[in-house]
Amino acid sequence: MNCRNAADFDALARSAQALRQREGVDVVALQEVDGPEAARQVFRQGWQLDCFVRRAHPQKVGFAIRDGIPYRCNGDLQALDIDGGTRAGADVTLWPGTRQEVRLLAVHLKSGCFDGKLDRRFEPCARLRQQVPVVEAWIDQRVREGVAFAVLGDFNRHLDRDARYPAGPDEAAPFNLMQAWSDNDPPGAELLRATEGQPYLRCDADDRHSRYIDDILIDRKLAARNSNRRFARLPYDTADQGRTLSDHCPVIWSLMP
């Protein structure tokens, strides 16, 4: 077990500062953070830390929101914890009651089923298969309400591969994830993916991944009012090589009119 020291937290804090000052990020979906007090060790100034799921386990999902942005926590998507050991979703509305209003669902889905059909006899795939309809129901409800939205976080799934294959005939037991969510049923339930067509950029020299599992999905309504979109990845500074940081680094999607 590796324990972080003050220098490690300082390095992570520099990344958080770069998100706000250099990249102009308004909101960050956080995973595997033990609540706002733990997050404050990294997101030190200029951030509101809130809407974390209620869970005894230290791996919580929540948000860092730029100071000054109005928001409303909508409560946990508890149904996403399908067995008492997986993770609920964190749900927030930014700029509530304005023309800019957008609802966000932060997820940290079941790990282990990165590729292949969800119906094979493999426990992580079975768990992920149960989570997919929960997120789909959340998406469909936002579409029916006419609210712009995004789903973001750690999907533990190579969505570039998943998106190539159909969901299958049973919404309650899909074969794949992306086309289950982006099926235009109800009309408007279509999603754009931040990493689509983007080369994989490593977080640091020790990053052994070759595909993204962190992503941002936005609906057509949010896409229509933000036609200028810029993708970025924020790797760790080479000067921090060897520090105990994280095996993830930020995926950024700037949405502009």
Image: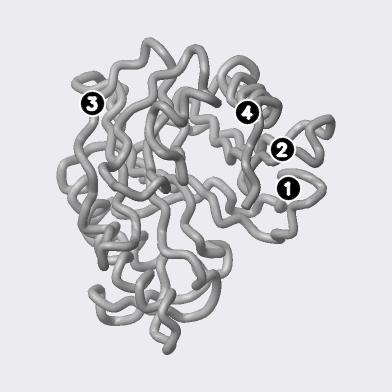
Q: Secondary structure at mark 3?
A: strand
Which quarter of the picture shows residue 178?
bottom left
The x, y position of residue 148, in whole percent, is 30, 37
Q: Which of marks 2 and 3 precedes in the sequence?
A: 3
CA gap between label 4 and label 3 equals 28 Å
CA gap between label 1 and label 4 equals 23 Å
**Disc 2 crowd, CA 10 A, few/some/many (<14, 14-19, 20+):** some
User: How many marks can you see?
Assistant: 4
The amino acid at mark 1 is Leu
Q: Which of marks 1 and 3 precedes in the sequence?
A: 3
Which circle marks residue 65 in the picture?
none
Which circle marks residue 9 in the picture?
4
Mark 2 or mark 4, whichever is nearer to me: 4
Q: Secondary structure at mark 2?
A: loop
* Marks 3 & 2, CB-CB < 8 Å contact: no
Q: Secondary structure at mark 1?
A: loop
* Marks 1 & 4, CB-CB < 8 Å contact: no
Which quarter of the picture shows residue 100?
top left
Which circle marks residue 235 in the picture?
2
To which residue does mark 1 refer? Answer: 201
Q: Secondary structure at mark 4?
A: helix
CA gap between label 3 and label 1 equals 33 Å
